[in-house]
Amino acid sequence: CDEKNKMLRLSFKAVTEGDINEAQAAEFDFEVGKIVEVSVCRKVLDGLEVTILPEEVPAFIPTVHLSDHVTNCFPLWSALEEGDTISNVMCLGKTKKKGIVLTKKPLLKACLHGVPINFSELQVGMEMVGWVKSFMPYGVFVDFPYELFGLAPIAAVSDQFILDTKSAFDIGQTVVAKVKNVDVEKKRFLVSLKVSDLTISEEGFQDRLIQGLKERMAVSEMMTCR
């Protein structure tokens, strides 16, 4: 304000959609593990842009997080349409690019309780549910809740000898990993994805199989009703 010349200077700053979304997300009571209901706003190549109800907060569900079964993810994405409501979705994390990220993976939701929420809580021998992040010639990087990620060296990826890690897993695939080594100084840890290292029950395997079949049936019903 220029009192001498009786002038008032104003500065206009463009408000973008991203600014609005960020402000809305800031007001949302976000917590990893929180179960929400969402409405599909838009389908994009790598997932679903949704709004959390009833707060109407924008969020994102990656296609690979629609199911524990990789083969079911794209059919579920294809069957869903704008305006559809998705229940029992879990808050997973926040990123600068996507904002609030959600997951529908049943196994990930079921096994969240008791998992480490920071690096200092990691212990050798722990078994954790995560998902495949990326492939390297020397192993597989695995993401876990609370922004933790570990490396499964190629020797610990499978009980069978493999040369190419991509032949054993898919990006986004749900996996169970056992912590084998924790390097506190370098803030990194190694995991094993070998079935022989894990305590997987036959009952758990059957439950995942049944869930996969239920998802297939849901896809068929959605496509039939369109």
Image (cartoon, rainbow, N blue to C red):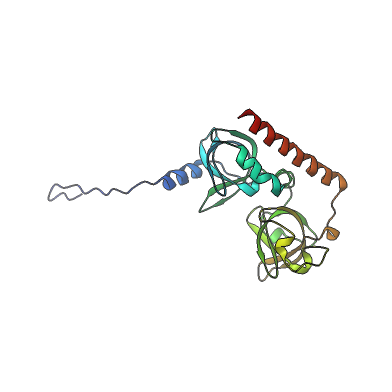
Along the horizontal axis of the image, is 223 left or right of 169? left
Above or below, comparing residue 58 to residue 149 in the picture: above
Which residue of the protein is positioned furthest toward the left in this rendering? 5
Residue 82 vs residue 98, the one in the foreground = 82
Task: Give the answer, above or below, for where 143 lies relative to 219.
Answer: below
Task: State the residue in front, 20 or 80.
Answer: 80
Q: Residue 110, percent across and down?
A: 74, 44
Give the left or right position of residue 9, taking residue 30 as reference: left
- Quarter of the figure that contains the C terminus: top right
Query: Is the residue 199 above or below the residue 206 in the image?
Result: below
The count of marks equals 0
Residue 187 x/y as whole percent: 66, 67
Task: Out of 135 and 74, give the one closest to the viewer.
Answer: 74
Residue 161: percent from left, percent from top: 81, 67
Q: Which residue corresponds to the image point at 62% horizontal and 35% vertical from the top-left?
A: 86
Q: Residue at 78% across / 44% down in the picture?
A: 208
Give percent across and percent down for residue 3.
Answer: 16, 49
Residue at the spot 56% in from the left edge and 50% down from the top edge: 94
Would residue 152 appear left or right of 99 to someone viewing this image? Answer: right
Please give the name of the residue rendered at 64% of the width and 49% of the height, measured from the top-left corner: 64
Would you say 178 lies left or right of 55 here? right
The extreme top residue here reads: 225
Image quarter of residue 160: bottom right
